[in-house]
Image: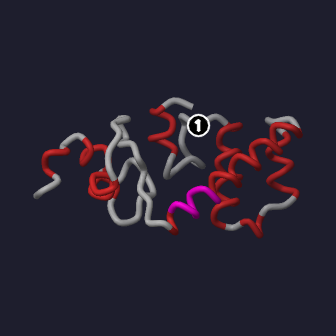
Amino acid sequence: MTEDQIDDGIDNFETSEKISDADRVALRYSDLMANAPEKIGSTIYAELAEHYSEAEIIELGAFIGFNIGYHTFFGSLDFYPMFTPDGRLVDQDESRRIYGDNPISHLDGAVQRSAAPDKAAE
């Protein structure tokens, strides 16, 4: 996926015209894994099978599960991303300023805040 597709689809992947059907169902699967794992069943696996092999579905599920656990763990440590949306390495104080109290999306103002690191004191 390109940055443009990610930016467009991060909050509206179900309706984004820039997201392919294969990416859309993978994102739906990821969303379910993170927010409603009890709803994962034969329907989503059938949708995934339209675009991915069994091995790819297993790899996708393992990758999503690992990342959900990773983010949960770091969230419990009050750990912020080490990089700004534009790729600069920053300390935790700068990251907190950029991403806010609950870092969810690189959109929601983080890109603009990261472009002005000298305004951290304001």
Residue drawn at (70%, 59%), measured in percent from left and top?
Answer: 33
Q: Residue 57: which quarter of the image?
A: top right
Horizontal and vertical percent for residue 107? 38, 48
Query: Which residue is the extreme one toward the left?
Result: 122
Horizontal and vertical percent for residue 49? 85, 41
Q: How is the image coloured?
A: secondary structure
Horizontal and vertical percent for residue 80? 41, 56
**Depth check: 92 or 19 in front?**
92
Horizontal arrangement in the rendering, residue 39 relative to residue 102 (left or right):
right
Q: Residue 106, relative to residue 17: is it above or below?
A: below
Residue on which the image places disc 1: 19
Q: Residue 86: which quarter of the image?
A: top left
Q: Which residues are magenta?
A: 69-74
**Depth check: 8 or 15 in front?**
8
Horizontal and vertical percent for residue 51? 79, 35
Which amino acid lies under the numbered mark 1 shown in the image of this protein? Ile
Q: Residue 115: which quarter of the image?
A: top left
Q: Residue 18, relative to residue 30: is it above or below?
A: above
* Quadrant housing the N terminus: top right
Q: Residue 88, relative to residue 10: is it above or below?
A: above
Residue drawn at (56%, 47%), measured in percent from left and top?
Answer: 13
* Quadrant housing the C terminus: bottom left
Is 16 inside the magenta-drawn segment?
Answer: no
Horizontal arrangement in the rendering, residue 87 relative to residue 71 (left or right):
left
Binning the other alpha carbons within 10 Å of mark 1 as few (below 14), some (14 to 19) or many (20 upward) gives many
**Depth check: 45 or 102 in front?**
102
Q: In terms of secondary structure, where does tag 1 sit?
A: loop
Q: How many marks?
A: 1
Residue drawn at (78%, 41%), measured in percent from left and top?
Answer: 59
Residue drawn at (50%, 47%), measured in percent from left and top?
Answer: 10
Q: What main secondary structure does the magenta stretch of the protein show?
A: helix
